[in-house]
Amino acid sequence: MAEDYIRPPIVALEVRSQRAAVWRFRILLIAVLLLLVVAIIVATRAIVHNNDGTGTVGGAMQRTKLLATLLH
């Protein structure tokens, strides 16, 4: 009795559906794109609207000029 260990039987698994993998990828891609669109909309609204809530673009222009001078 050299060895007492008995290996458990190997259980074969079904191959995962490629169609399901494609749909998972599509859903993930759509979710990421939607998050990107929402982030762009939120950022654009934050840039365009002033702190006083008037929605004029002048404040955004001043901030852009200020950033341009600081970064240059």
Image: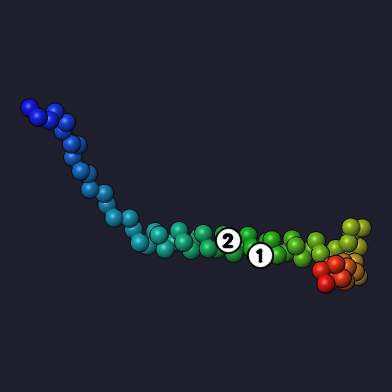
Can you say whether 13 is above or below 49 in the image?
above
- When asked about the image quadrant of residue 49, the answer is bottom right
- When asked about the image quadrant of residue 48, the answer is bottom right
- When asked about the image quadrant of residue 2, the answer is top left
Left or right, residue 20 beside residue 30: left
Can you say whether 44 is above or below 2 in the image?
below
Secondary structure beneath disc 2?
A: helix
Instruction: Specify the label residue 32 is tagged with.
Output: 2
Residue at left 58%, top 61%? 32
Binning the other alpha carbons within 10 Å of mark 2 as few (below 14), some (14 to 19) or many (20 upward) gives few
Left or right, residue 39 beside residue 20: right
What kind of colouring is applied to the model shown?
Answer: rainbow
Q: Position of residue 16 (x, y in %)?
A: 33, 55
Pick whichever, 8 or 28, lies toward us.
Answer: 8
- Tell me the distance, in whole angstroms, between the alpha carbons under discs 1 and 2: 9 Å
Q: Earlier in the sequence, mark 1 or mark 2?
A: 2
| Residue 44 can be seen, yes or no | yes
Left or right, residue 72 beside residue 25: right
Residue that badge 1 annotates: 37
Q: Position of residue 21 (x, y in %)?
A: 40, 59
Left or right, residue 38 beside residue 48: left
Residue at left 12%, top 30%? 3
> At label 2, which amino acid type do we have?
Val
Residue at left 75%, top 62%? 43
| Residue 60 can be seen, yes or no | no
Binning the other alpha carbons within 10 Å of mark 1 as few (below 14), some (14 to 19) or many (20 upward) gives few
Q: Position of residue 53 (x, y in %)?
A: 89, 59
> At label 1, which amino acid type do we have?
Val
Can you say whether 50 is above or below 5 in the image?
below
